[in-house]
Amino acid sequence: MRVILAEDSTLLREGLVRLLAEEGHEVLAAVGDADALLAEVEAHTPDVVVTDIRMPPDHTDEGLRAAVKIRETRPEIGVVVLSQYVERNYAAQLLTSSAERVGYLLKDRVAQVEEFLDALERVHAGGAAIDPEVVRQLLIRTTHVDPLTRLTPRERTVLEALAEGHTNAAIGQKLHISLSAVEKNLNAIFDKLGLSRTTGYSRRVLAVLRYLES
């Protein structure tokens, strides 16, 4: 795939460039700030953008704002944001507009090379790649009535895996249950979330959005 990187840590940025090149991917540009990222996206047509959330000059949310802008103006480009910590507000801002071609990973995940590369592939293919720790943090609920409270523990676990971007087959392998059991749980989830009349892949997207918004 064709990738643009934005990371202000020279060591991590160069490490990612080398890793992706060794895996046969083309790194179109590797920059250290959000303005340069937007300029490179405008100049090129990457398949996926990988960006840190916090970058110069203020080291607040420059990378996130650039990622959101890219998703709004170039929805065909996959966007993966990297964060040192789970930042729930940032995750919700990035993810709730759509659960397609998007990833939110902790930087520690980059060290797990196979998992990182798999996440990029999922985003490139049009799916989602949400770090399990991010998903766990997003499970911290408010006291408001939430349709997710109607889900059984197994259904919540299946929905959590769905939010991480896994296919039905991968969910079955991850949870050690049959494909038919995964489908049964998903149908129950769709019904309890009021999505039973919606057809196709959009139900999966809507279920993930409902999960992330609650």
Image: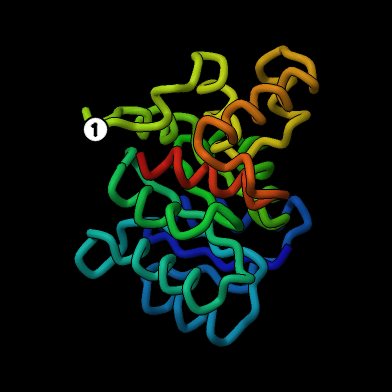
Q: Whole-percent x and y of residue 5?
A: 53, 64
Q: Is 65 rendered above or below residue 150?
A: below
Q: Whole-percent x and y of residue 183?
A: 73, 27
Q: From this viewpoint, which residue is outermost toward the front?
A: 197
Residue shown at 28%/61% (left/top)? 61
> In the rendered view of the protein, which quadrant contains the N terminus?
bottom right
Query: Could you tell me the amino acid type at mark 1?
Result: His
- Looking at the image, residue 181 sits to the left or right of residue 37; the answer is right
Image-quadrant location for residue 186? top right
Task: State the colouring used for the structure image.
Answer: rainbow
Q: Whole-percent x and y of residue 52?
A: 40, 56
- Looking at the image, residue 151 sits to the left or right of residue 182; the answer is left
Residue shown at 39%/70% (left/top)? 66
> In the rendered view of the protein, which quadrant contains the C terminus?
top left
The residue nearer to you, when weighing 128 against 155, is 155
Count residues near mark 1 (Cα–Cα under 10 Å), then give few for <14, some for 14-19, many for 20+: few
Image-quadrant location for residue 162? top right
Residue corresponding to mark 1? 144
The residue nearer to you, when weighing 84 against 87, is 87
Residue shown at 30%/43% (left/top)? 87
Q: Is 78 rendered above or below residue 35?
A: above
At mark 1, the secondary structure is loop
- Looking at the image, residue 80 sits to the left or right of residue 170; the answer is left
Q: From this viewpoint, which residue is outermost toward the bottom?
A: 43
Residue shown at 73%/52% (left/top)? 22
Q: Is 86 rendered above or below residue 31?
A: above
The residue nearer to you, when weighing 147 against 141, is 147
Does residue 130 appear in the picture of this structure? yes
Q: Whole-percent x and y of residue 47?
A: 67, 67
Does residue 19 appear in the picture of this structure? no
- Looking at the image, residue 144 sits to the left or right of residue 12; the answer is left
